Image: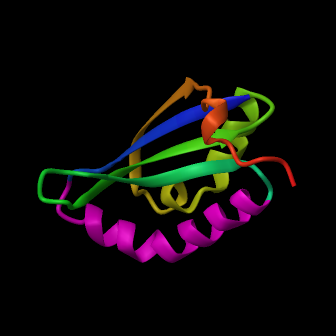
Amino acid sequence: MQFLVIAYDGNDEGALERRLAAREAHLKATAQMKAEGKTLFAGALLDENEKMIGSAVVVDFPSREEIDKWLEVEPYIINNVWKKVEIKPYKVAGIFMEPNK
């Protein structure tokens, strides 16, 4: 089942520093999930000055419980970057999906 994960960074003075410090581990984990077919696409949320303030990720997991397991090891969670996470059932339109290989 597909889900949209919208995660907001903290807005304290050290928020961007925490994000940047954890970014390499987050990108590596996201690439691994992409290879496994669990991440369909992802990107950073930006403010009006194009500063990163969060993330939007479309994932494909069998259940909400599996998403919770992923979040337990997600570098942005472990490193206290994401402060608020919203998870919604989601369906990517078929015209945007890559054909199965």
Q: How is the image coloured?
A: rainbow
Quarter of the view holding residue 64: top right
**Position of residue 14 in the picture relative to residue 84 (left or right):** left
Quarter of the view holding residue 80: bottom left
In the rendered image, which quarter contains the N terminus? top right
Q: Where is residue 4 in the image (x, y as percent from the top left)?
A: 54, 34
Q: Where is residue 50 in the image (x, y as percent from the top left)?
A: 19, 60
Tell which of 3 and 96 is nearer to you: 96
Q: Residue at point 36% right, 68% down?
A: 18
What is the tally of numbered marks visible in this picture? 0
Tell which of 99 and 80 is nearer to you: 99
Q: Is residue 89 above or below residue 11?
A: above
**Position of residue 84 in the picture relative to residue 95 (left or right):** left
**Position of residue 70 in the picture relative to residue 43 (left or right):** right
Q: Residue at point 59% right, 26% down?
A: 90
Q: Is residue 68 above or below residue 29?
A: above
Quarter of the view holding residue 88: top right
Is residue 90 covered in magenta?
no
Q: Which residues are the magenta region? A: 12-35
> Magenta-highlighted stretch: main secondary structure?
helix
Q: Where is residue 43 in the image (x, y as percent from the top left)?
A: 44, 55
Q: Which residue lies furthest to the right in this view?
A: 101
Q: Residue furthest left?
A: 49
Q: Which residue lies furthest to the top in this view?
A: 89
Q: Residue at point 41% right, 76% down?
A: 21
Q: Residue at point 46% right, 71% down?
A: 23
Q: In this view, does 46 lie above or below 94?
A: below
In the rendered image, which quarter contains the C terminus? bottom right
